[in-house]
Each structure stands twice: as C-alpha cells, then as structure tokens.
Amino acid sequence: MPLTATNDTAMQAENVVRQVLSDTAARSHENRSRENKTHHDLTSITSFIGGGGLRFWFSISPEAPQTNHAQVIVQVSDKELTPKIIGPLQSALSH
C-alpha cells in the first residue's frame, strides 16, 4: 500500500473521530446550549503515518516503519467520556 493511501485513510479516520465526538457532545451537552456555554470534548488528535509515535509520547514500543501503518491518537477533555465513545467510534470507523 502506498504511503499516500495510508495517509488518506488516517485522515478519514480523524474526520470520523471528529464527527463522532461532535455528535456525542451535541447529545450530552444539550442543556449547556441553554446556558450559552461552549464545551469541546476533543482536546487533540495526532496521526503518525508510516510508523508509530516516538517512545517518549507513550509507553508502548514504537512500530517499525511500514507504508501500510498509521496510528491515530485521540485525547479527550474528560476521562469519563472515553468508555462512552468507544462503541460509537468503533462502529463508525468499521463502517
């Protein structure tokens, strides 16, 4: 697989993550809109294309460079949100 195809797929995955988190925020923060408050669940999203992140980023061993490998790391604003988005994210990404 060419590296450009891997990059395109990772970017599509990032867009899916953004959409799922946006939909989740809209559902779970409906009463915030009445209070005119803004809340963002997605803190950051980082993709490593062609290999894994550097060892100092997290405590797993980096993947060897491969053109068909990408790693997408998602950081959310609240650890309580993680178990709520795993199912919708997996479903959307599988689709």
Image: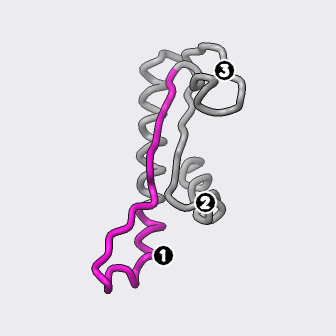
Q: Label 3, on which residue? A: 63
Q: At 37% from the left edge and 80% from the top edge, which residue is drawn?
A: 32
- Per the model, the C-alpha gap separating discs 3 and 1 is 36 Å
Q: At 57% from the left edge and 26% from the top edge, which residue is drawn?
A: 53
Of mark 3 and mark 1, the one earlier in the sequence is: 1
Q: In the rendered image, which quarter is residue 63 located in?
A: top right
| Residue 7 horizontal/vertical position (percent) | 44, 26
Give the amino acid at mark 3.
Glu
The boundaries of the magenta stretch are: 22-49
Q: Label 1, on which residue? A: 28
Q: Residues within 10 Å of mark 1 (few under 14, many from 20)?
A: few
Choose between 26 and 38: the one closer to the eye: 38
- Disc 2 on helix, strand or loop? helix
Q: Residues within 10 Å of mark 3 (few under 14, many from 20)?
A: some
Q: At 45% from the left edge and 24% from the top edge, which residue is drawn?
A: 5
Of mark 2 and mark 3, the one earlier in the sequence is: 3
| Residue 67 horizontal/vertical position (percent) | 55, 16
Q: Label 2, on which residue? A: 79
Q: Is residue 27 depicted above or below 73 in this figure? A: below
Q: Is residue 53 depicted above or below 83 in this figure? A: above
Choose between 43 and 28: the one closer to the eye: 43
Please state the total of marks drawn on the protein image.
3
- Per the model, the C-alpha gap separating discs 2 and 3 is 26 Å
Choose between 37 and 3: the one closer to the eye: 37
CB under 8 Å between discs 1 and 2: no
